[in-house]
């Protein structure tokens, strides 16, 4: 997935006061073969902790003969995190990874100094109508890890810890939440979880991280007098006691972490310096990034613009 070109610094900022700091409405974006709901970055909020990008793919019904076709494209300075509720995506990258991601799994790809990947629907799945529903997030890397060697790790659903609470089932996808630690290797303090809330459930969100948010995937959520339906993110004030309630049940994503400082975001590149962004742009134009084995012929050109 990719964002529209911008050279604006992406800054994390918490606002003291009430329980809620911001309410963000997802905006539709066309990524070519699929419409997505983009939550971060937004005009109201550029980052939540190290999370610099948040896309909800679907829920979409894809007709027979159609599928996801995100051609090879580069990344630097971030980790991509893909998680599905329905459907399947085939991930390939320039390290030689070739991995199907299915509901409940986590694909964590650390771009570091540079990686190229593609995301597609396999041929057999295209023969019939099928559904796709999932999230892709980007995590900015700490300055000292921005140029680390690229890596890819797949974590099957069965390896991710699940906590059963009264009225809630929480799968910790990355980081630590409510005493559970995900096996996913992270480079800065954060949490990312998939929570299913039963009707009438109340859930307290720990203040372990200074920046936290909840995104509604399905159902509805209430917090501090604010209602959130699907496509809405509630960003919480730093240190505030947060209690979520769902009268009729909900599926939500919980994210949080510590701010890393200003980041520049251009297309698929994230960096703490504009010079590194410009170098990545020049490298992609000149074909200096590595190819994706098995998907070498197509690529997404660098967007026109500054």
Image (spheres, helix red, strand yellow):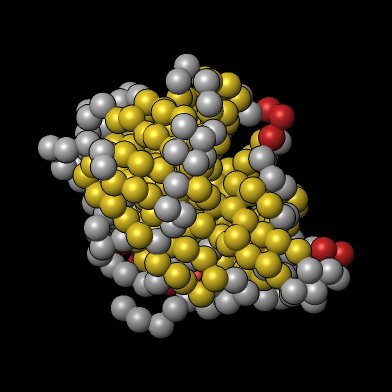
Q: Residue at the top extreme?
A: 179
Q: How many marks?
A: 0
Q: Residue at the bottom extreme?
A: 304
Task: Using residue 185 as the reference point, say whether residue 306 is left or right of it.
Answer: left
Q: In this view, does 267 lie above or below 41?
A: below
Residue 265: quadrant of the picture: bottom left
Q: In this view, does 301 lie above or below 250?
A: below
Task: Using residue 79 as the reference point, say whether residue 34 is left or right of it.
Answer: right
Residue at left offset 51%, top offset 40%: 249
Coordinates of residue 180 in the picture (x, y in percent) = 52, 20
Picture quarter with the C terminus: bottom left
Nearer to the camera, 193 or 50: 193
Residue 282 in sight in this render: yes
Q: Is residue 237 above or below residue 70?
A: above
Coordinates of residue 299 in the picture (x, y in percent) = 62, 74
Nearer to the camera, 154 or 160: 160
Residue at left offset 34%, top offset 48%: 227
Residue 110 in sight in this render: no
Nearer to the camera, 31 or 119: 31
Q: In this view, does 285 lie above or below 214?
A: below
Residue at left offset 16%, top offset 42%: 15
Q: Residue at the left extreme?
A: 17
Residue 169: quadrant of the picture: top right
Coordinates of residue 212 in the picture (x, y in percent) = 33, 37
Coordinates of residue 205 in the picture (x, y in percent) = 37, 28
């Amino acid at each position: 997935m990719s964002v529209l070109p911008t050279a604006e610094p992406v800054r994390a900022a918490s606002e003291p006061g009430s329980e809620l700091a911001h309410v963000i409405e997802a905006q539709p974006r066309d990524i070519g073969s699929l419409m997505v709901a983009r939550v971060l970055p937004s005009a109201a909020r550029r980052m939540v902790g190290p999370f610099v990008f948040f896309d909800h793919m679907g829920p979409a019904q894809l007709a027979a003969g159609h599928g996801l076709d995100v051609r090879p494209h580069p990344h630097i300075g971030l980790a991509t995190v893909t998680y599905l509720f329905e459907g399947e995506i085939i991930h390939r990258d320039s390290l030689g990874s070739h991995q199907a991601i299915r509901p409940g799994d986590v694909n964590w790809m650390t771009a570091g100094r540079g990686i190229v990947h593609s995301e597609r629907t396999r041929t057999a799945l295209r023969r019939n109508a099928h559904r796709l529903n999932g999230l892709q997030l980007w995590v900015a890397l700490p300055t000292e890890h921005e140029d680390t060697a690229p890596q890819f790790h797949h974590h099957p659903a069965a390896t991710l810890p699940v906590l059963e609470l009264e009225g809630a089932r929480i799968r910790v996808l990355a980081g630590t939440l409510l005493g559970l630690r995900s096996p996913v290797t992270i480079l800065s303090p954060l949490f990312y979880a998939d929570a299913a809330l039963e009707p009438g459930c109340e859930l307290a969100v720990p203040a372990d991280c200074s920046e936290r948010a909840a995104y509604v995937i399905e159902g509805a959520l209430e917090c501090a007098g604010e209602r959130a339906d699907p496509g809405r993110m509630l960003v919480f004030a730093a240190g505030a006691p947060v209690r979520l309630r769902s009268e009729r049940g909900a599926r939500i994503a919980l994210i949080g972490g510590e701010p890393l400082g200003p980041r520049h975001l251009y297309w698929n590149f994230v960096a703490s310096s504009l010079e590194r962004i410009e170098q990545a742009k020049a490298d992609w134009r000149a074909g200096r990034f590595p190819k994706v084995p098995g998907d070498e012929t197509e690529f997404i050109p660098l967007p026109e613009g500054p």
